[in-house]
Image (cartoon, rainbow, N blue to C red):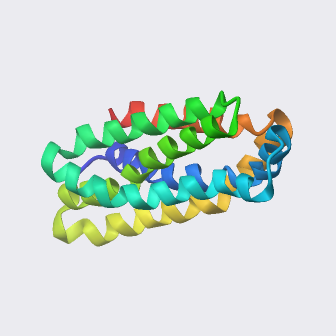
Amino acid sequence: MPTRMFALALASIVLIGPLAVHQFMPAIPAVKAEFGISDGAAQLTFTVGVFVLACSTVVYGTLADRFGRRPVLLTGLALFLIGNAIAASASSLPVLILGRVLQGAGAGCATTLVRTIARDAYGQQNLVKAISYLTMFYTLGPMIAPLMGGILIDAFGWRATFVFALLFGGAIAFGAW
């Protein structure tokens, strides 16, 4: 049986996806105001991250089967961190969108690989229990991420959502490593 630290690492990794998606939602009006863009363009900054996250989940399974779980997971987490760094320092809408694309592409690894790694590590007998705990953590993300995002935006501005995701994601990547 894997250790509790292993289970905690998987649970933390699964939070990456909701963090990338839902923490940014309250920032959309602030992004619109800062860049002087239309509602549609502001919504695009949200939608592109969700779309790329969804599409990337299909790719990670195949890559993990070919190159191994750990290297693909660490690469995805690195993409997530790079995307957050770019988005946090974005001076224009295209740069912010690039950051969101990389953030979403990186976050897609968590959705796919955590369940695959759990299957590999826990086996058939303990898999249902492991997946239920991982699902619980995954559902906590959308519940707390918008609140955290709103607090960060009110206190420090919209870029703080990406700085927080960068720091939190960095801690998770270090734990996964």
The quadrant the C terminus occupies is top left
Residue farthest along the left direction in this orientation: 66
Q: Position of residue 105 (x, y in %)?
A: 43, 47
Q: Is residue 1 visible?
A: no
79 in relation to 149, above or below: above
Closest to the observer, 158 or 51: 51
Is 83 placed above or below 136 here? Answer: above
| Residue at 77 percent of width and 44 percent of height | 31
Q: Residue at x 47, y 39 (%)?
A: 80
The x, y position of residue 81, in whole percent, is: 49, 34
Drawn side of residue 163 relative to residue 2, left or right = right
Q: Name which residue lies at 57% across and 29% down.
A: 85
Nearest the eye: 34 or 129: 34
Q: Please state which of residues 139 and 2 is positioned toward the viewer in this rendering.
A: 139
Count of numbered marks: 0
Q: Is residue 146 visible?
A: yes
- 149 is higher (above) or lower (below) than 172: below
The picture places residue 113, in percent across and down from the top left corner, at 31, 54
> Can you tell which quarter of the image residue 147 is in?
bottom right
Q: From the viewer's perspective, is 107 left or right of 142? A: left
Q: Where is residue 144 shown, x and y percent of the image? A: 66, 56
Q: Residue at x 65, y 50 (%)?
A: 45
Q: Nearer the viewer, residue 18 or 28?
A: 28
Q: Quadrant of residue 57?
A: bottom left
